Image (tube, grey):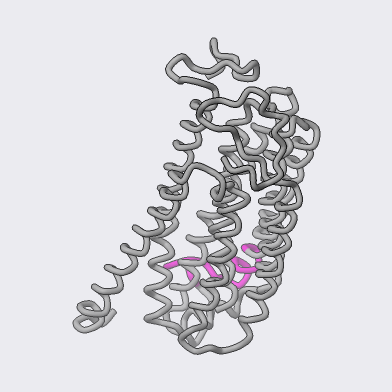
Amino acid sequence: MSTAVNRSKGEFAHHFDSADHEFETSKFGVWLFMATEILMFGGLFVAYALFSSRYPEIFEEGATFLNWKYGAANTIILLFSSLTIALSVYFLQKNNTKAAAINLFITLLCAGGFMGIKFIEYSHKFHEHLYPGKYFAHETTVENLALYFSLYFSMTGLHGLHVLIGMGLITWVLIRTLRGEFHSKYYTPVEGVALFWHLVDLVWIYLFPLLYLV
Amino acid sequence: MSSSHNHNHSDHSHSHEAGEHHILPFDVYLKVFGSLIFLTIITVWVAQFNFGAFNGLVAMGIATIKAALVGMYFMHLKHDNKLYSTILVGSVGFLILFWFFTFFDFVTRVAEKSTL
């Protein structure tokens, strides 16, 4: 990527009409990727919808093992991180590199906080032998309660994986921001990572009421 | 681009033919964040009431309002090329189609003939 074209100096690849054309094309690619992400999470959401309508008692019982306060805290943390990464794009548009870097750093801290709370939650589940699928070993009178925890771990696990990947991506654009590679004319990678991070937030917006507030 | 919003043009001294990047005012981000927190509180508050079959619908309705706020303002869809909104709405549309046929099959076939 960083061969001959120096985008921080306003250059763009020769097959584009302008730097703006290149920016819009990159964003189009990110949005197509978003569509595949929505469809991937979508499969799990459809499974959830189907099973919870068929076996509401399993889902009501399963949700009692979750503490909504952890879920609500993580919701607020993720919403705040969405704000800060949106602001990092805003500050780059205004050529305020320092404020953009600070906001990216806060986003990273929030992501770490989210994973910390997730770690506490998973530890509690494992301690009570609430494992997914055939590994489920919790003593309960509700038949097939493992179904809820299979979906719980699949959905929050896939989401958590996205948070971890997001942390890597944010670190990458933070380093490049600190190097002064981005400004109002070129901030494409930050825009792309921000879009990805907002999607992670969007998925959690639906997961929180579905899993914690049944 | 309309000039109905008081965004700063100074960063775009040489605007391209393809259109400049729309910069949302700073306070819009804060207002959207405030609304999202407010809606989160509503989500938790409303969960203690039992609307019967509408419980899920109410929760998903509020979540969709939140998702729309994130999409329109944080992801800039409101002032961006409509192509991106089309991709988002289109993929959600196919998801609903997926959901519809799965449920249709389940209700008319699996639920009638299987012990699942």
Residue A50 image position (x, y, % from top left): 37, 73
Q: Which residue is pictured at 22% across the width and 79% down the height? A: B108
Q: Which residue is at the front of the view, A79 or A127?
A: A79
Q: Which residue is at the front of the view, A31 or A113?
A: A31
Outermost residue toward the front in this view: B3
The number of discs equals 0
Q: Main secondary structure of the magenta part?
A: helix
Q: Which residue is at the front of the view, A12 or A199?
A: A12
Q: Quadrant of the N terminus of chain B?
A: top right
The quadrant holding residue A189 is: top right
Q: Which residues are magenta?
A: A122-136
Residue A111 shows in this picture: yes
Residue B38 image position (x, y, % from top left): 71, 69
Residue B46 image position (x, y, % from top left): 63, 81
Vertical arrangement, residue B9 with respect to residue A12, above or below: below
Left or right: residue A167 versus residue A30 is right
Left or right: residue B108 versus residue B3 is left
Residue A209 image position (x, y, % from top left): 57, 72
Q: Which residue is at the front of the view, B56 or A58?
A: B56
Q: Which residue is pictured at 70% across the width and 41% down the height? A: B7
B28 falls in the magenta region:
no
Vertical arrangement, residue B110 with respect to residue A110, above or below: below
Q: Which residue is pictured at 50% across the width and 54% down the height? A: A158
Q: Which residue is pictured at 23% across the width and 77% down the height? A: B110
Residue A161 shows in this picture: no
Q: Quadrant of the C terminus of chain B?
A: bottom left
